Image (cartoon, coloured by chain):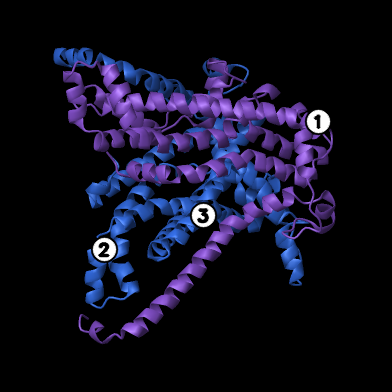
Amino acid sequence: MKGFMHNTWKHRAHFLMCMPAFLVLLLFSYIPMTGLVMAFKKFDYGLGIWNSSWNGIDNFKFVLASGDTFWRMTKNTLLYYVVFTIVGTGASIALAIALDNFIKKKLGKTFQTIMIAPVFISFAAVQFIVYAFFNGSDGIVNSMIELFGGTPVRWYTHASSWPAILTIVKIWNSVGYGSVLYMSVLAGIDTGLYEAAQIDGANKRQQILHITLPALVPMITTMLLLGVGGIMHSDTGLFYQVTRNSGILYSTTQVIDSYVLNAVITGANPGFTAATTFYQSIVGLLLILGANGLVRKLAPDNALF
Amino acid sequence: MSSVAKTVQPVAKKKKFRTGQLILGILLGIYTLFCLLPVVLVFIVAFSSNDSITTKGFSYFPSSFALEGFEYVFRYGKQLLVSYGVTITVTVVGTFVGLLFMSMYAYSISRRDFRIRKFFAIFMIFPMLFSGGQMASYVIFTQMYHLKDSIWLLILPLSVTTMNVIILRTYVATSVPEELMDSARIDGAGEYRTFFQIVLPLMKPALAAVGFMMATAYWNDWQNALLYIESESKTPLQLLLVRIQKSIEFLLNSKDISGSALAAMQGNIPQYSCIMATVIMVVGPILVVYPFFQKYFIKGLTVGSVKG
């Protein structure tokens, strides 16, 4: 202990240099964690966290009893997570392999620059673009449908189309960016491996299957694992902005994050919301601990911690 | 397997190779267009005449072009100018403060003989696994810290993030040689001087990468603004966009609308050419700057993915 104190004193400069970021994390990440106790209180915005009275697990009972909203947003959150992860990872890898195999490197670079760009457009702006395509009376998509003799659809009241629309927007937004990481791995593969495979008569498809994909596995595991921590979270902008937070679409578009954001802004159902965020944080933590434990058993090198 | 290859005709192979590349090029081109066309539409609509939009709807081929959209934007320019000021301040201050805080932290916890570093490392990683969530943060920030409508809430919460600290720490651990720091110390440089004059300059590529990512996050942040900002004088660009959209809805439902949006629109429902012109003003700067930073942030992403 004495040695430890001595060491810390010797490194007081480093200790001090840690302080600013330490304080920011303390104030803006750690102290808000204590706010989760309001899940067990009859929370009232007027009284604040500490003065609201305890009510045990009433909030959770209420959440479970109210059924619909809660299950709907849990289901949406998880389903979108799964779809986005599968489609996003698959498309990013495919794009990375395609760009890596494209001989015209300069053209490929230009393509890549354009493909990454959408990730830098905020969803507050994206929603206007989506509106230009999908609005019922004068959107591009309906004009196209009419051009080919179909009947236009009022997309913004048509909940069942939104899983597809949001998936397309998500791909547009993030696949180019997502492929960057995988490309950096591909650039690191020893070209000698491909040459040897070619001499052995492996065609392109076989090379991809037996050399490229196995080389990507560690990166894929790391990315999936990092993603698991966010399983209970969603890209709020996508679900809140792009859908214009439209109640008619909630059945297929409301996720936990967009629900909570809306509830905080309107001040509605504080008890319900507090219980929901508590559940969101705890389940998220358990999932990432579980996933990391699993990876540590199967492939210790790829575990996060 | 290995004996199949020997009879392949070089000519045939080359031809097959070419068609393969052609198909690949076309597919990549199509995906590139898929990414590009929505952005192109923003520009076309911004330069379309209002007549064209009313009669023809949104179109890549408007019946006539006009500068009405931008004229409108410049007429309500005052709020836009204020919002630019807010966004630029938040982005610049946030990025510099964040980079400074995080690189000091990253450097310190990568010093091997600094024993308490283990605690600091865990302290930094835990928020990635667990968070208080939006509601608890909202209540704590507004009721405990009394920071409602404070520009600090746009700056500080985003200034230190686990992922960025990891990227910087990994960079220090892999690219800044330990001997260099040791020799600086032997030459009598203090800890602070070693950091600011020797380590920090060597971290430039990582700082550029992380800095660009942070700047983008600040520039594009609408959520904190929507939750916390009320005054028009503190309204950043993204919140202005959100308010314009909200007020269209409100106007269509003929209810009250927020002052800044009303001022911005001079009491009219804004035409889409004007909205798209605003969108260009909001996202334009990032899209112009980003290609220059592309190589840095690609490097940064790559460094960050190697766990330290």
Task: Determine crowd level at label 2: few under 14, some 14-19, many 20+ residues with C-alpha closer than 10 A.
Answer: few
Q: Which mark is residue A115?
A: 3
Residue farthest toward the left in the current orientation of the protein: A3
Horizontal placement of A277 versus B277: left or right? left
Query: Can you give x and y, in whole percent of width and height, for residue A194 in the image?
Result: 26, 68
* Element type at mark 2: helix
Q: Are marks 1 and 3 in contact (CB under 8 Å)?
A: no
Q: Which residue is mark 2?
A: A191
Residue to which mark 1 is pinned: B256
Query: In whole angstroms, how far apart are the C-alphas of marks 3 and 2?
Result: 26 Å
User: Are discs 3 and 2 less than 8 Å apart at CB?
Assistant: no
- Marks 3 & 2 on one chain: yes
Q: Nearer the viewer, residue A126 or A232?
A: A126
Q: Position of residue A228 (x, y in %)?
A: 40, 45
| Distance Cα–Cα, label 1 vs label 3 | 40 Å
Decide: few, some or many residues near mark 1? Use Cα within 10 Å; few <14, some 14-19, many ≥20.
Answer: few
Residue B147 lies, in percent from the top left, at: 57, 18
Mark 2 residue type: Thr
Give the label, 1 or 3, closer to the camera: 3
Point out which mark residue A119 bears.
none
> What letter labels the chain drawn in purple?
B
Tell me the subunit letter for badge 3: A
Element under label 1?
loop
